[in-house]
């Protein structure tokens, strides 16, 4: 693949044909299709990973808040008993 780039310096008709073949529309359409597939796959996987991470953060935050609430309620019960 890279040898086509080195042949460009020679300016021979054969090297120009190699470069044009390397950049042919048929190959560009195939690579464009793979580009779209990679972008879509990355978007889906990234969204899934982001959703999972945010879900775990939300669950841990909720647990932490429940523990704080239980501690607060126990302190309030203790102060009510003292009064």
Image (cartoon, rainbow, N blue to C red):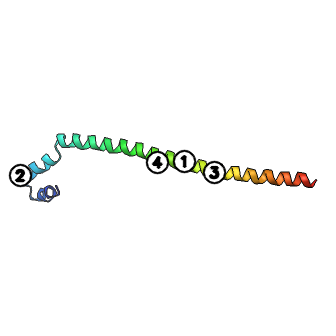
Q: In this orientation, which residue lies closer to the viewer: 31 or 3?
A: 31
- Which of the marked residues, 4 or 3, is nearer the chain's N terminus? 4
Distance from the alpha carbon under mark 4 to that under mark 2: 49 Å
Categorize mark 3 by other alpha carbons within 10 Å: few (<14), some (14-19), many (20+): few
Give the percent coordinates (x, y) of residue 21: 13, 46
Q: Secondary structure at mark 4?
A: helix
Dot 2 or dot 1, earlier in sequence: 2
Q: 15 or 57: nearer the eye?
A: 57
State the SS at label 3.
helix
To which quarter of the image does residue 36 belong?
top left
For image coordinates 18% across by 46% down, the residue present is 23
Q: Going from the N terminus, do you reach mark 4 or mark 2 first?
A: 2
The tag on residue 14 is 2
Which residue is disc 1 drawn over? Answer: 54
Query: Which residue lies at the image location 84% right of the left edge and 52% below the top edge?
Result: 76
Q: Secondary structure at mark 2?
A: helix
- Name the residue furthest right: 83
Horizontal and vertical percent position of residue 48? 46, 44
């Amino acid at each position: 693949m890279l040898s086509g780039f080195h042949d460009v310096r020679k300016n021979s008709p054969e090297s120009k044909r190699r470069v044009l073949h390397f950049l042919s529309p048929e190959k560009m359409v195939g690579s464009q299709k793979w580009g779209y597939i990679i972008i879509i796959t990355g978007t889906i996987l990234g969204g899934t990973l982001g959703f999972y991470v945010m879900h775990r953060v939300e669950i841990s935050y909720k647990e932490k808040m429940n523990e704080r609430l239980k501690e607060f309620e126990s302190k309030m019960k203790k102060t009510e008993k003292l009064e």
